[in-house]
Amino acid sequence: MTQKYEGIIFDMDGVLVDSETFYYQRRKAFLEEYDLSIEGLPIQQFVGADMRSLWRPILEVNETHYDEAFLTEKYHHYKIKHPIDYSDSIEPNAKRVLQFLKRKGYKIGLASSSKMDVIQEVLKLGQLTSFFDVIVTGSELEKSKPDPKIYEFTAQELGLAPEKCLAIEDSEKGIRSAHDAGATVWALKDTQFGMDQTLADERLDSLSDVCKKLQEMEQIGYTC
């Protein structure tokens, strides 16, 4: 049976690594040092977002003399001093899922809002780097998620139309990005942040369900 999808494109944070809660708390702690509050902003706005898209709403709800350039520089140094231990956060089934997809001949891409050095660190720790044919960071694009460009570009780099790709996402921004690019979207069910995942074509209980569902759809004879 012909495979419905030729490429599988993964988000990283919240999909391959459980990092979103740490990111939110780190951002909150940093901002409190400058008397900036994010209590008035929905937590969903932060999940799957890079800081470029967050400074404006943060500054709009706070009276402050600090500007985006100053805060960006200070936050860069703050992150260095307060790193996340990704080795404790990597999805335990990620490697098995990627091995399964590789065996079946799918082209595999990564489309993440994180910076490339962070992506490389996570993939190295999880021994996942070799599975990806294409790795794209939204930080190097003019706009990252929810703009569809990151998924359009990743599909292009895989040599595929977005319609031939399946995106594995979790956040509202990521789901919107992949959906608007024309990809099919399967979302890992959110149990923490109350995110609206209605744009996703399917919702999965776990990352391993990617394999199970593809097996059901494509009538293949083994699972990951």
Image (tube, grey):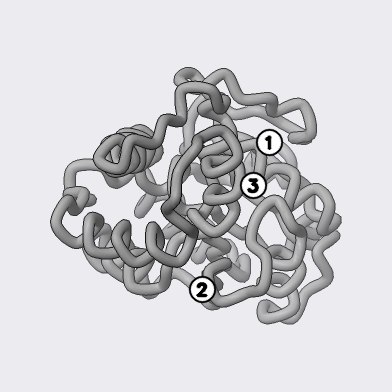
Picture coordinates of residue 160, whole percent (x, y):
78, 74
As drawn, the label of residue 174 is: 3
As drawn, the label of residue 135 is: 2
Choose between 201 and 18: the one closer to the eye. Answer: 18
Is 88 situated left or right of 1 in this image? left
Q: Which residue is mark 1?
A: 216
Give the foreground label among 3 and 2: 3
Give the foreground label among 1 and 2: 2
Choose between 175 and 173: the one closer to the eye. Answer: 173
Above-or-below relation of 217 to 137 = above
Quarter placement of the N terminus: bottom right
Q: Residue flagged by tag 3: what amino acid is it?
A: Gly
Q: Characterize the local packing of mark 1: few (<14), some (14-19) or many (20 or more) Cα atoms within 10 angstroms.
A: few
Q: Residue flagged by tag 1: what amino acid is it?
A: Glu
Q: Which of pointers 1 and 2 lies earlier in the amino acid sequence?
A: 2
Q: Quick check: can you spot residue 125?
A: yes
Q: Quick check: can you spot residue 18?
A: no
